[in-house]
Image (tube, helix red, strand yellow):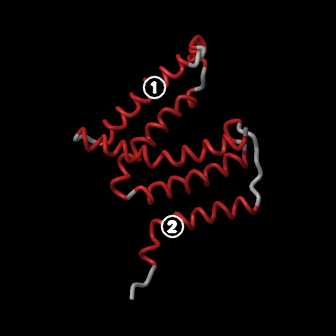
Amino acid sequence: MVPLLLLMAFGIGLVIPLQSAVNSALRDALGSGSLLAALISFAVGTVFLAGFSLATGQPFASLTGLPRIAWWQWLGGVMGAFFVFGSTLLAPRIGLAAMISLIIAGQVVSSLAFDRFGLLGLPVREISWVRLLGAILLLVGASLVNFGDRWIVKG
């Protein structure tokens, strides 16, 4: 089961640049700004998830628990919207490789903190020197993707 989950995570990573490129093309096709393209993307995603939830028999009765959730649990949608809007805005301006390398570097840095301290009820996972080295290498890689061409002396 774990290998399948790891493959799924890798597949999500493969699709994120595609999503950014598609949303950027949507923005261009609409002749609008990134906010409208992100809104349409989220609307399509909402319709898809509603249909998929119905098709898989999700218990919609559990929606009665919505009034009991904490205020901060609503922020996942806001963060998702920020991601879609931000990637739609940034992809054509800084390029997909630059954008994705910085997104991944940011994700790894914050993920290490979530793992180490078990934030928001997640299980605590220690940060070994090997994991820390991996994060440092990712930061170095993001720096090279974004600034490496400037550091090379052209003869």
Q: Position of residue 127 (x, y in %)?
A: 74, 55
**Residue 143: x and y, percent?**
51, 67
Q: Quadrant of residue 28?
A: top left
Residue 33 in picture, x, y percent from top left = 28, 42
Left or right for 52, reference 44: right
Q: Residue furthest left?
A: 31
Q: Secondary structure at mark 1?
A: helix
Q: Which amino acid type is marked by label 1?
A: Phe
- Residue 145 lies, in percent from the top left, at 48, 66
The residue shown at (59%, 15%) is 57
Residue 32 vs residue 92: left or right? left
Q: Residue furthest bottom?
A: 155
Q: Is residue 20 above or below residue 39?
A: below
Counting residues from the start of the chain, the first of labels 2 and 1 encountered is 1
Question: Mark 2 = which residue?
Answer: 143
User: Where residue 92 is drawn, which disc sits there?
Assistant: none
Q: Residue at x 42, y 55 (%)?
A: 96
Task: Using residue 122 as the reference point, say whether residue 103 is left or right of it.
Answer: left
**Between marks 2 and 1 in the image, the one whose residue lies nearer the viewer:** 1
Callout 1 crowding tier (Cα within 10 Å): few <14, some 14–19, many ≥20: few
Q: How many angstroms separate mark 2 from mark 1 (CA)?
A: 37 Å
Amino acid tagged 2: Ser
Tell me the quarter of the image containing the C terminus. Answer: bottom left
**Residue located beneath label 1 in the image:** 48
The picture quadrant where one finds residue 68 is top right
